[in-house]
Each structure stands twice: as structure tokens, then as C-alpha cells.
């Protein structure tokens, strides 16, 4: 007797969220099956890749591959423009790393100026990533959302401590998309979504960042959170967890020793660039298979690989 | 399908003799269904009934043991599709592809490359467990020569050979090492089955699509062979992913025992020679149901990422990952370098040591035994207290091994400062930051 596999398409689906405007706008989410389970039902929108551009440009970047890719770029704006040509890229993530008050404390005005310059120069959708300082991030998101009205950007992220501020400005006043960030826990993720919707931010304007980590560094928590969120969203039709998931990869993987330790320190490990690429690829792939609808990455070779990976499974 | 109490009741003698210790046969059947009483407690069960029951209560997915000696490995035995549902049991294993089409020098080189990657990560040996020996239809002599070389490499073997005659010749040489014979398909099913059974080895069976794979397994089971692995490799990545998911889901969710075997996915075949793509796929199959992942090559670049991922995914959610208690000298720390104390929860260790390494300041990181709990949890449970710290200092002989008398403690347990100072006279106890991310700035300021 021939075997007919049972299909497992769900009646629930992940919200489809549009980022950016015009020809280069993208839609993430919209699927009613588990990630890459195309044998259950077609997947509406394939997962996307955003390229991380740091506001400090190439400062502190040790990867020869990344430096080579941006060779000739004099400003962060140049880099953002160049990043659009990366094979597989479909959004630009501007990371205001230097805004941290415990670091260089770049002013909100400077952040806004850079965001405007980048937005004027690129066509792809823009994601704005903060410096992880709750108060400063709220100020940056507020000002940048205002300055970039009409661009339909995504701000990463509103957290439990500043969701009112970020949700009200980016989500309500300026009509941008809000990323809701929680710390690798399905209940915290849901709670923040509920709070944002009570604030009046429409579900269709919310993406989730349910946490991030590099492969080998507590990734089991992230993996299980992704599995559980997708199961709740699809199998149990939990509306408060049906937001598409955006996961920063590069901010995690480039901070672990596998990606940072120079070859002289551990010669048997081989060239740094290869290790860092594989770390980024491995982590991104695992997140996508778990349920991320978009990943944020850095190295051109890693972006190209993950793009090819996504296409090969669609 | 798991039997319900009523199904078991139908198999009992229904005479309520109470000899099993239960008041009625019905009560007994209910207890058996729950798993609280073994079926053997009833002296009147017929052999037929016992067979039916043991079949029905057997695990859905078989655990297959392959390899011999210290290269023996367990595959499969999973009970859930996702680790949060309970736990995953047997981590996926890696194989590197060798081919009878390669010349001797190339084979030697690849084996040497495989052997280079061999290290320990949080108490687990990380290395390439299998050599995957592909037969390129170029004669039994070449293949046996390859097998002979591989046998000396101290790894478990997978023979990928669809020619039963050649497979037999190869098994004559290596069957004592209990290799997997992979390559049964609808055209060679009987011959391969005979060869595998005669040699007493596990047989790998594949097919053009999921339905053919299913029929092939059925046919082999019909011939009494239940020592199988399923080769899920399809024409491309998409087909392979679909096979791997459908096999495991059909088995564990839809409870079809025919699909209850571990899987092989051959990335050397579907990654198209793209080493980064191979990593992306290996990562995907780590999460979605590859039991053995065959790679064209694994160097440290691939291993560090993939083995780290594997170790995370296959940790038991009910048991925290722990590192060994002791002194970890970071950034070239010596006996005069400042000490920093934390718990043995692996994630804590990785975060704290990672931040310190980033600071480039020499630090003696002291890891105490806190049963693998995080700082606050351990403190709340009494596993991280002035008493346990004192005990650790005595057992690890810190006083004599380290001359520095400065001890940084986690900011979250600042309340312990006084108690620790009382237990460790002569030590200057400093309260560190609340979060690991603040350590770089903290230690730089502190060392300045």
C-alpha cells in the first residue's frame, strides 16, 4: 500500500507585515505551515535577509571579507548603498551601536541625520536597531521614526521597559513598524504583544524579536522558544503570537570567540573569516528552520549562502 | 498506536481472580495502560496477547546501535518532534564522504583532515564519528582498498554501495566493525537484505520518493529485517528536507512504526560542493531530523559552529549544562591576577568568560559547583552561598594556588559580601556588575 503523508497545514497563519515602500518593499510572514514545510502547503513569502550596517562603519571590523566588500566606501551611507548590491539582501539594518551612553554616546541628532542620509540614499526597506540602552533607544526611535515618516521602517526594538514610548511614537504617531523584543521566553513574548495591542498598535504593525543567541551559546533556549511560538501561533491559533519573527544574527555571532579569536591564537582553527562565516551561516539557518521570518546578517558570503539556502528549500 | 485500557482489557482472561493484585481485570488493564503495572503480573495472559501488547508498547522509534568498541554509537530512539516537548535523546552524528574514485593520496589527506578535528566542549568529545565510503562503480578491488584504509582510521564506517556483490566483498573485510551498509533500493532489495543479514550489520534503505522509501521499508520488515536506517537523501535539498520531516513526523506524530528508524542525509550529494551551503543544510538537519549527516568535509570552521549548535539542541531541558568547577586562567592570568567567582551553569560560564576574554585583562575565573544553576537560582536554592564557596576554596586549594587576594563576586549576590569575607579571612571581596555585558568596562576600570 502506498504511503500518503498526512498534511499539516494550519487554519491559522502568521501575519503578513510589509516593510518599506515602492518596488523594493518586502512582505514577511503570511505562512500557515511550519518553516520550509512546503510539502504541507505553499509558503506565501519566503524568509528575508537584512544586512546590518553599523553606525561606526568598518571601525573594529576584523573580517577581511567584509572590509573587502566595502572597499572604496567612505561613509556609512556609501556602505548602506553598497550593501543593497549584496546577493540575497532585501533590507538594510542601521545599527546605532555608538549611541550607547556608556560608550561614545552619539547624540540623537546625529543618529537622525545619519538615518535620513541613509534613507535618502537607499531604496530597500530600513530597519533601525538601537544601542540596547532603554532610554536612549526610545529617544532615537522616536526621533528617527518622525524623521523617516512615510518610509515604513521597522524599529528594533520596543521592550517591556520602553514599549509605551516606542509603541506610541513609532507605532502610532508615525505609523512605522515596531519590533517587540523579549528575552527568549514565549510568555514574555506574548505579554509584550498584548501590551502593544492594548496601547493601540495594530497587530499588522508588529514584528517580534524573541531573543537571539549564537550557535553553541545557549541556543537551545532560542530554538525552543521559536518552536513553541510557531506551534502556539499556528496549531493553537494564538493571535497574540502570530507576528512574524525578526532575529538579529550578526550582533551575536560576531561577539563569540569562534568569530573573533585571531588565527595566531589558535592556528588549528584556521582563518578567522571562514570561522565567522560558518558561525553566521549555522546560526541563521537554525533560526530560519526554527521560525524566523527575517534574519539580520553581516558578512556578504554568509548572506549569499543563506539566500541560496532559503531558495533551495522553497 | 498506544493501547488504551479497554483494548488491554479485551486481552485479559476477564475472570477477576485478583492474583495480579488488582480487584478486577478492568482495574488491572487501566493500570497497565498507564504503565504503572507490567503486563506480566497477570499469570493468565496468552502468548498471543503478550506479543500484541509488547509490540504496541514498544517505543515508536527504534534505537539502532552501530559500530564496535569505542566507535559504537546509538542512533534514533527519539520520542518527541521538538525538544521542548520532553527531550531529544541521541544527538545527530557526522560522517565525512570518501569515494573509491579518489586516489590514495587524496584519501589519506581527507582522513588526516577528519582526524584533525577532535576536541572537547563542555564534557563532550567533538569529532567526526563516521567515514562514509562511497562506491563509484569502479570495481570491488578499489572499494575494498578504500575500506581497508578507512578501517585503520579509528572511526565507525558507513558503506554506501548499492552493488550487493561488492558490498559483500567489503563486508567480508570490515563486518567486525559493525558498519552500516547503505544503498538498499527497490531494485536490489533482496540481495542487499541477504548481504546485510549475513554480516549482521544495519542496512540503510532509500527510495526515489517518500512513498517508495516506505514500500521498501515495509518489504524489508516483511523479510524480518528491523535493523535499518532510512536514507532520506532525495534529488535536492528540498526533497531531502521533506523526506526527513515526513519520515520523523509520520513516525512520532502519526505513530507509524514503519518509519521508526534513524535517518541518513547525504549533504555531499545535495550541497553541490558549496561548503557554506553544506553548513547551512547541516544546521537545518540538526534541528529537523537528520540522525547521520554526511559532509564533504569538516574543518574547525564548520565544526566549531555545528558541534556547538548540536550540543545546545541535544541538551536535556530538564538537566542544565554544567562546566567543571575549578580555576580558569583567562587572558594569560597567573597566580597574582585578580579572581572572579561565578557558578558552573554553562551559559553563565560562556557569557562571563566571553566578556572577560573580550576585555583582554588577565583574570582567574573561579567556577564553583552550583549544580548547574544560574547565579540567582543557585543562591536561592542554597547552592551558592558563603559556605559552598568556602568549601570550594578548600577543595580546589585556591589559597595556595593563587596569591592574589582580590575576589570579584556577581553583583546579583552582593548580599553575600559580608558572609564571604567572614568565611574567607584575608580576602578583599569586591562586588561586580549585575550583568555579564557590563564586565568589560568593570574589569578595565578595576585593573586601571
Image (cartoon, coloured by chain):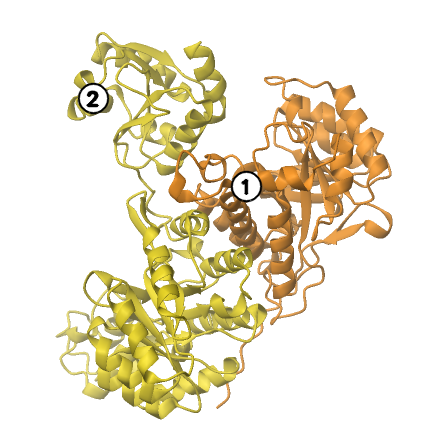
Rendered residue at 55%/53% (across/down): A285
Give above or below for B303 relative to A80. below
Do we see residue B335 in this rendering?
A: yes
Q: Give coordinates of residue A200: x percent, y percent.
A: 75, 38
Q: Give coordinates of residue B436: x percent, y percent.
A: 45, 26
Element under disc 2: helix
Give above or below for B116 relative to A177. below
Give above or below for B58 relative to A57. below
User: Chain B drawn in what color?
Assistant: yellow
Same chain, labels 2 and 1: no
**Apparent side of residue A103 relative to residue B40 in the rendered image (left or right):** right
User: Chain A drawn in what color?
Assistant: orange
Rendered residue at 47%/11% (across/down): B445
Q: What residue is shown with label 1?
A: A212
Do we see residue B252 in this rendering?
A: no
Circle on res. B393: 2
Residue A251 vs residue A135, the one in the foreground: A251
Residue B312 vs residue A309, the one in the foreground: A309
Amino acid at each position: 500500500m502506498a504511503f500518503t503523508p498526512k498534511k499539516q497545514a494550519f487554519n491559522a497563519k502568521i501575519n503578513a507585515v510589509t516593510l518599506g515602500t515602492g518596488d523594493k518593499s518586502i512582505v514577511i510572514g503570511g505562512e500557515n505551515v511550519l518553516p520550509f514545510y512546503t510539502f504541507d502547503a505553499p509558503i506565501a513569502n519566503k524568509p528575508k535577509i537584512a544586512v546590518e550596517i553599523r553606525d561606526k562603519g568598518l571601525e573594529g571590523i576584523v573580517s577581511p571579507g567584509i572590509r573587502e566588500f566595502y572597499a572604496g566606501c567612505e561613509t556609512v551611507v556609501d556602505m548602506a548603498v553598497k550593501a543593497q548590491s549584496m546577493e540575497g539582501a532585501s533590507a538594510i539594518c542601521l545599527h546605532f551601536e555608538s549611541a550607547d551612553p556608556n560608550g561614545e554616546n552619539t547624540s540623537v541628532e546625529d543618529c537622525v541625520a545619519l538615518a535620513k542620509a541613509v534613507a535618502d540614499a537607499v531604496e530597500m526597506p530600513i530597519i533601525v536597531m538601537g544601542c540596547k540602552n532603554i532610554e536612549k533607544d526610545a529617544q532615537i526611535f522616536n526621533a528617527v521614526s518622525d524623521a523617516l515618516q512615510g518610509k515604513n521602517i521597522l524599529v528594533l526594538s520596543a521592550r517591556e521597559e520602553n514599549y509605551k514610548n516606542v509603541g506610541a511614537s513609532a507605532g502610532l504617531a508615525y505609523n512605522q513598524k515596531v519590533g517587540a523584543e523579549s528575552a527568549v521566553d514565549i510568555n514574555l513574548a506574548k505579554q509584550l504583544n498584548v501590551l502593544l495591542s492594548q496601547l493601540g498598535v495594530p497587530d499588522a504593525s508588529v514584528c517580534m524579536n524573541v531573543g537571539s543567541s549564537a550557535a553553541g551559546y545557549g541556543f537551545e533556549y532560542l530554538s525552543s522558544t521559536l518552536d513553541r511560538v510557531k506551534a502556539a501561533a499556528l496549531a493553537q491559533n494564538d493571535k497574540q503570537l502570530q507576528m512574524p519573527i525578526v532575529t538579529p544574527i550578526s550582533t551575536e555571532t560576531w561577539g563569540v570567540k569562534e568569530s573573533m579569536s585571531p588565527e595566531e591564537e589558535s592556528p588549528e582553527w584556521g582563518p578567522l573569516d571562514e570561522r565567522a562565516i560558518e558561525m553566521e551561516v549555522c546560526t541563521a539557518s537554525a533560526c530560519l528552520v526554527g521560525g524566523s521570518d527575517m534574519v539580520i546578517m553581516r558578512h556578504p558570503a554568509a548572506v549569499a549562502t543563506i539566500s541560496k539556502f532559503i531558495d533551495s528549500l522553497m | 498506536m498506544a493501547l488504551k485500557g479497554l483494548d488491554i482489557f479485551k486481552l485479559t482472561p476477564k475472570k477477576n481472580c485478583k492474583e495480579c493484585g488488582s480487584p478486577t481485570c478492568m482495574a488491572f488493564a487501566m493500570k497497565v495502560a498507564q504503565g504503572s503495572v507490567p503486563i506480566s503480573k497477570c499469570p493468565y495472559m496468552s502468548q498471543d496477547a503478550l506479543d500484541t501488547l509488547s509490540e504496541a508498547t514498544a517505543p515508536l522509534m527504534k534505537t539502532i546501535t552501530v559500530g564496535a568498541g569505542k566507535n559504537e554509537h546509538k542512533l534514533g530512539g527519539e520520542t518527541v518532534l521538538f525538544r521542548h516537548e520532553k527531550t531529544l535523546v541521541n544527538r545527530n552524528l557526522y560522517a565525512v564522504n570518501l569515494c573509491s574514485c579518489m586516489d590514495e593520496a587524496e584519501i589519506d589527506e581527507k582522513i588526516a583532515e577528519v582526524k584533525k578535528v577532535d576536541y572537547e566542549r563542555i564534557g563532550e568529545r567533538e569529532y567526526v564519528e563516521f567515514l562514509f565510503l562511497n562506491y563509484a562503480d569502479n570495481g570491488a578491488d578499489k572499494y575494498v582498498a578504500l575500506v581497508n584504509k578507512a578501517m585503520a582510521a579509528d572511526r565507525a564506517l558507513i558503506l554506501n554501495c548499492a552493488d550487493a556483490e561488492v558490498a559483500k566483498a567489503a563486508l567480508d573485510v570490515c563486518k567486525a566493525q559493525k558498519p552500516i551498509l547503505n544503498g538498499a533500493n527497490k531494485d536490489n532489495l533482496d540481495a542487499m537484505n541477504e548481504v546485510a543479514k549475513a554480516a549482521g550489520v544495519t542496512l540503510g534503505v532509500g527510495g526515489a520518493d517518500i512513498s517508495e522509501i516506505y514500500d521498501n521499508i515495509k518489504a524489508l520488515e516483511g523479510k524480518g529485517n528491523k535493523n535499518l536506517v532510512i536514507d532520506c537523501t532525495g534529488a535536492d535539498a528540498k526533497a531531502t528536507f521533506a523526506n526527513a520531516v515526513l519520515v520523523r513526523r509520520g513516525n512520532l506524530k502519526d505513530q507509524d512504526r514503519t518509519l521508526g528508524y534513524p535517518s541518513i542525509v547525504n549533504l555531499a550529494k545535495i550541497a553541490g560542493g558549496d561548503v557554506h551551503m553544506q553548513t547551512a543544510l547541516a544546521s537545518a538537519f540538526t534541528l529537523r531530523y537528520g540522525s547521520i549527516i554526511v559532509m564533504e568535509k569538516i574543518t574547525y570552521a564548520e565544526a566549531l559552529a555545528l558541534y556547538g549548535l548540536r550540543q545546545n539542541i541535544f541538551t536535556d531541558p530538564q538537566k542544565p549544562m554544567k562546566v567543571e568547577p575549578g580555576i580558569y586562567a583567562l587572558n594569560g592570568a597567573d597566580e597574582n591576577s585578580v579572581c572572579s567567582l561565578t557558578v558552573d551553569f554553562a551559559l553563565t560560564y560562556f557569557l562571563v568568560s566571553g566578556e572577560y576574554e573580550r576585555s583582554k585583562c588577565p583574570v582567574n575565573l573561579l567556577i564553583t559547583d552550583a549544580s548547574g544553576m544560574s547565579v540567582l537560582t543557585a543562591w536561592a536554592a542554597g547552592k551558592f552561598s558563603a559556605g559552598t564557596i568556602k568549601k570550594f576554596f578548600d577543595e580546589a586549594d585556591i589559597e595556595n594556588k593563587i596569591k592574589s587576594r582580590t575576589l570579584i563576586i556577581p553583583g546579583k549576590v552582593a548580599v553575600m559580601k559580608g558572609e564571604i569575607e567572614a568565611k574567607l579571612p584575608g580576602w578583599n571581596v569586591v562586588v561586580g556588575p549585575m550583568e555579564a555585558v557590563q564586565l568589560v568596562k568593570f574589569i578595565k576600570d578595576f585593573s586601571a
